[in-house]
Amino acid sequence: MKKSCLLAASIAAALPLSVQAQNSSKETALEEVMVTAQRRTESLQNVPISISAFTAADLEKTNATSAKDYLQFSPNVTFTEDGEVGNRGLNLSIRGVSNVSLGEVSVQNSIGYYVDEVSVGSVASGAFNPQLEDMERIEVLRGPQGTYFGRNALGGALNLTTKKPTEDFYASASANVGRYSTWGASGVVNVPFSDTFFMRAVAAYDESDGIIENVNPSGAENSGYEYTHGRVAFRALPSDALALDLSVSYTKEDEGLDATVASGVLDLDTKSIFGDGFVPIDNQLGFYPRNQRKVNHDAPEYNRNKITIVNARVAYQFDGFELRSVTGYIDSENGRLFDQDNISTDTIVRRNDYSGESYSQEFRLQSTGDNRLDWTVGALYAKDKIEQFNTIRAGAEGSYTDPDTGEVIGLLPPIPAGFRINENNWVFETRSIAFFADTTWNATDKLALTVGARYTKDKIENATFGVVAFESPVDPTSASSDFTDASPRVVLRYMPSENITTFLSASSGYKAGGVDSVEGETIPFDEEKLWNYEAGIKTLLADGRVRLNASVFFIDWKDLQVQANFLLDPDDISSGTERTLNAAKASSKGAELELQAQITDNWSAGLGLGYLDAEFDDFKDAIIQGQIADLSGERLPRTPKITANGYLEYGRDLTGKLNGFVRTEWVHRSETPGDLEGVAREELGLPKFPYEIPAYDVVNLRLGISGETWDLLGSVENLFEEEYYNATADNFGLGGIRLKPHPRMWNLRFTYHTR
């Protein structure tokens, strides 16, 4: 912690030097960043939206391979890793707005996730974390983005743009090695077949033994993985007015057991069945934090994901406006086998087999060029379908024998192996139609007014069948609900000078409701709505050597959707139920600041700060393990008050043909409750560990050297081995709530490329 604070202090102390720098030069000014947050290419500094943008150079320098690698540098953005859909599984929160994450309930997302203009949020695993090879730019948009991103961009959106085929030949090959027998290889090739037809292809493979080792020879060996990813993109320019783009990507993720260890603190599900006096079983390995490497699981666990994405875009330029078509198709699969008892005995095993299919078609007509009136109109049709099969079955061992004392602990009643404790099939289907429009009146060169809106109609259909509880059939259910919404947006932008942009905005966000199934009955939940009020300023200082962007905001929620997991019958493990509840009112207020500075020709630095105060204003009927609790006035889960990050970098020419850099990074998150049980921790008499996720500070180190045709990058993440976790998986398990450790990691990557 002291080392982290010293790094932060050094960054803060260095930043004013950039403002005072003498004889500043345009050659050392910060590079202008272009974004497409409003579906047209604009300077980051002119867009009246709070955005954290990461260029291709940023992603390569920080060795970004997963969403967590850039999200940690975004103020008021939090991600949690509970390990339940593999090493890359994330649950994202922006300004306190997060997805409802339930194992057997599929609901609409709260954060829009787009790759090359296509929504990729509806996948079988519930959360898509795409591979980042050959990425052009990533934008993290904070606040509702209903007008342009629409499909459930309630709290914000992630806008990812891949590199497109170009008219120049290019090729590269990379190889990397890292801790825990991690290694991989990737390649990129760009081929211009003619002056008007180009192709770009990407292929990557990564393998690792993972951070968790299983000491039980009957189970999966470790939390290792094999990732295979490929993308091929084609671009055709038949005329000056017409551009055709087609890409197909495929990702396959084969993983072993979850990268989590037991905490030794039983969750309320387990306590309700085995009683408060039940002692967690540690399999002679110990609990977190003493044990952060080993588990003793007998089941051959796995996590498997397959995702295919087809993306087709057509753009035709007319005189003064453009017609654009965006077509997306996603086919996804998720398979999971989990040792539900979480110990060495063959007692309870869970299996999930999910599949998803998504189709979307958007048409957009928008003005081009410099106009007094800029406008966009469009329409979208989308259909998402998720099919789930879930089964929890008894194993062959109904008791556990303590190897030290010989004590026999009964775990199951006398039931045969394969006995279905709980089994079900779900089908979730969403059809969405939307119309949107956005108009900006450039009243003067300095003053602009934007008015936009999106109308959405969603039809939600859910069905269950083949439901079994303790080998007893449960009646199937089916239900559907329709939801409509009009989400407006108003923005006033004033630019007193070329390098200063100020804005005031009010925007509405919407997420469809749905229907849950409980004991053969359907229980609806309402749509979630919010208003976001924001004021911001974006500035360039010291002849473009300093970029300072800041904003303040207030979010007012109605019917916030939250998750609840509990047993309908405390004495019956088969009665496990997952419900989506509505908190009547909630609010979130805060501030964000992002600063980048080119201090000298060789030194650069950055600082990001976020403050967030998010709470339930009115939530009197929260369900916590079958009990009704009043959470009014309590903090929302997964909402740390302070998010902070910084970096300090030194780079220089080493010789006429060699360049090098060294970079230190710091990431801070303050403490926060991990889930609803954590929010109600004091009321329920629960311990602080692990329900209250503690604050943490992480320091990373990067070093790089580059020649004319090659690059060598070394990274050490969590340099000082900070012991931390960022999520609690409060599922049933006899070893307690599971936590994902974060050991020190190192990686070395070499890339050869054409000039």
Image: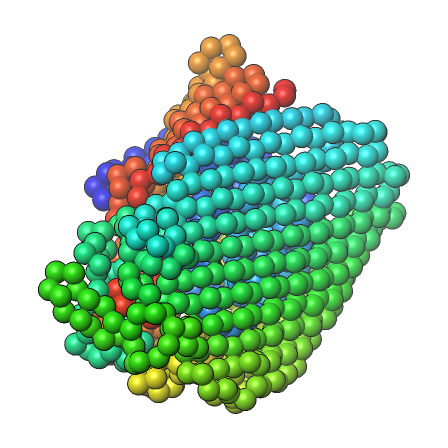
Name the residue at 69% across, 72% down.
431
Name the residue at 58% across, 27% down.
173
Image quarter for residue 193? Answer: top right
Q: Please state if 325 lies on the left or on the right of 622 as rendered.
A: right
Q: Is residue 171 above or below residue 458?
A: above
Q: Please state if 419 lies on the left or on the right of 166 as rendered.
A: left
Outermost residue toward the left in this view: 405
Q: Position of residue 491 (x, y in %)?
A: 61, 61
The quadrant of the image that shows the N terminus is top left
Q: Is residue 17 above or below residue 654?
A: below
Colouring method of the image: rainbow
Residue 330 visible (yes or no): yes
Q: How many marks?
A: 0
Q: Is residue 319 above or below residue 451?
A: above
Q: Position of residue 228 (x, y in %)?
A: 56, 43
Residue 95 visible (yes or no): no
Q: Is residue 706 above or below residue 52?
A: above
Image quarter for residue 172? Answer: top right
Q: Please state if 398 lies on the left or on the right of 237 as rendered.
A: left
Of residues 366 and 419, the one drawn nearer to the viewer in this rendering = 419
Name the residue at 75% across, 50% down.
312
Q: Please state if 133 lies on the left or on the right of 257 as rendered.
A: right
Q: Position of residue 88 (x, y in %)?
A: 46, 51
Name the residue at 61% across, 85% down.
479
Q: Position of residue 647 (x, y in %)?
A: 38, 37
The quadrant of the image that shows the C terminus is top right
Of residues 38 and 264, the one drawn nearer to the viewer in this rendering = 264
